[in-house]
């Protein structure tokens, strides 16, 4: 990856399997509800190969990952190994993260170490609401230990989620798990593990900003929302004391970088801050 040639690094993109390869009951209904919530223009999410082509054309690097929520959703996960292999075939534009449900315990920790050693995985995606756990639950710490000892990154969904929105019972998703305050404990107990809090953390935005300001190892990615909807306090902190800890993320494919970047251009953001958010902060964090 030639970072100098890129206009941005998208820290938050989702890997999806090819059409027809995911037979789990309810999966298509789940994807349809997501597309409706985000007004996404597709019947089935794009494949990783299609994603790579898009990002290559736009000259944007992307961190890409699956989500392992097998226990809570019953949906088979997209194999971390396959995601890593496709990312390696498109390494000019893609950086692979993996996802392991903390419920897998020591087996998950072994998997994490293997993925880091054999596939060059740089980080791990967690979705507390989809996976049904509090991030500061000590049962997850055995997995965090494997991530921390390798110097890898832990990225956590925070705040309200589009997953299950409008579906009966919210598809069983409980938003309480994604209050960012639970990550304060993780940041204390793993002070050298980089932690990314994904998304504007509605309705807990101030908690997220406080943690990112207080804990040196905590960052915020600005994915999942169009910038025109950002809370004013998030913009204020991004323009000032957290300018080195804010990261561009789109939440592809439900939000395309084109839309995010166009709305970001209209945001009242200092000129010297824009390149930090779009690329330089991620470049430093990812060590690329």
Image (tube, helix red, strand yellow):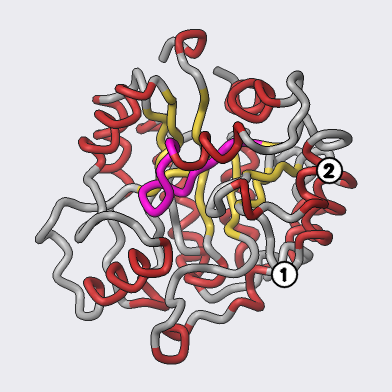
**Percent position of residue 229, x then y:** 63, 55
Q: In terms of depth relative to the viewer, which is nearer, 191 or 232? A: 232
Q: Position of residue 107 (x, y in %)?
A: 44, 59
Q: In whole angstroms, how far apart are the C-alphas of marks 1 and 2?
A: 17 Å
> Residue 243 is drawn in which quadrant?
top right
Instruction: Kindly report the secondary structure that dominates the magenta region of the rendered protein.
Output: loop
Answer whether labels 1 and 2 touch (C-beta < 8 Å): no
Quadrant in which the N terminus is drawn: top left
Q: Which quadrant of the structure image shows residue 44?
A: bottom left
Q: Residue at the spot x=33%, y=47% of the render? A: 15
Name the residue: 38% across, 49% down. Answer: 14
**Where, quadrant-wise, is the C terminus in this rendering?**
top right
Q: Where is residue 185 drawn, in percent x and y?
A: 80, 60
Residue where numbered disc 1 is placed: 203
Q: Position of residue 127 (x, y in %)?
A: 52, 62
In this view of the protein, which residue sits in the foreground, 165 or 141?
A: 165
Graded by Cα atoms within 10 Å as few (under 14), some (14 to 19) or many (20 or more), the crowding at tag 2 reads: some
Q: Which residues are magenta?
A: 247-258
Q: Is residue 126 magenta?
A: no
Residue at (68, 60) in percent of width and height: 201
The quarter holding residue 194 reads top right
232 in relation to 236, above or below: below
Q: Is residue 254 magenta?
A: yes
Upstream in sequence: badge 1 or badge 2: 1
Q: Residue at x 52, y 24 (%)?
A: 8
Left or right of 184, for residue 26: left
Q: Characterize the local packing of mark 1: few (<14), some (14-19) or many (20 or more) Cα atoms within 10 angstroms.
A: few
Residue located beneath label 2 in the image: 236
């Amino acid at each position: 990856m030639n970072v100098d040639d890129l206009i941005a690094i998208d820290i938050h993109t989702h890997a999806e399997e090819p059409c027809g390869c995911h037979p789990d009951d309810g999966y298509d209904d789940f994807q349809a509800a997501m597309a409706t919530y985000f007004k996404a223009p597709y019947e089935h999410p794009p494949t990783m190969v299609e994603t790579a082509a898009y990002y290559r054309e736009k000259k944007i690097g992307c961190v890409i990952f699956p989500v392992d929520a097998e226990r809570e959703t019953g949906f088979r996960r997209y194999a971390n190994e396959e995601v890593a292999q496709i990312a390696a075939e498109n390494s000019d534009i893609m950086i692979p993260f993996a996802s392991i449900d903390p419920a897998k315990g020591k087996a998950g920790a072994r998997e994490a170490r293997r993925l880091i050693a054999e596939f060059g995985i740089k980080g791990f995606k967690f979705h507390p609401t989809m996976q049904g756990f509090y991030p500061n639950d000590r049962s997850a710490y055995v997995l965090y230990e494997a991530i921390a000892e390798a110097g890898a990154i832990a990225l956590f969904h925070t705040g309200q989620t589009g997953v299950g929105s409008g579906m009966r019972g919210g598809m069983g998703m409980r938003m309480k798990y994604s209050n960012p305050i639970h990550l304060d404990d993780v940041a204390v107990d793993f002070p050298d593990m980089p932690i990314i809090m994904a998304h504007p953390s509605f309705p807990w935005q101030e908690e997220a900003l406080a943690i990112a300001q207080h804990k040196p190892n905590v960052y915020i990615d600005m994915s999942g929302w169009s910038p025109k909807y950002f809370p004013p306090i998030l913009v204020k902190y991004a323009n000032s004391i957290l300018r080195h800890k804010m990261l561009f993320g789109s939440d592809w494919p439900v939000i395309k970088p084109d839309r995010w970047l166009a709305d970001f251009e209209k945001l009242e953001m200092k000129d010297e801050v824009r390149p930090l958010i779009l690329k330089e902060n991620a470049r430093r964090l990812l060590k690329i």
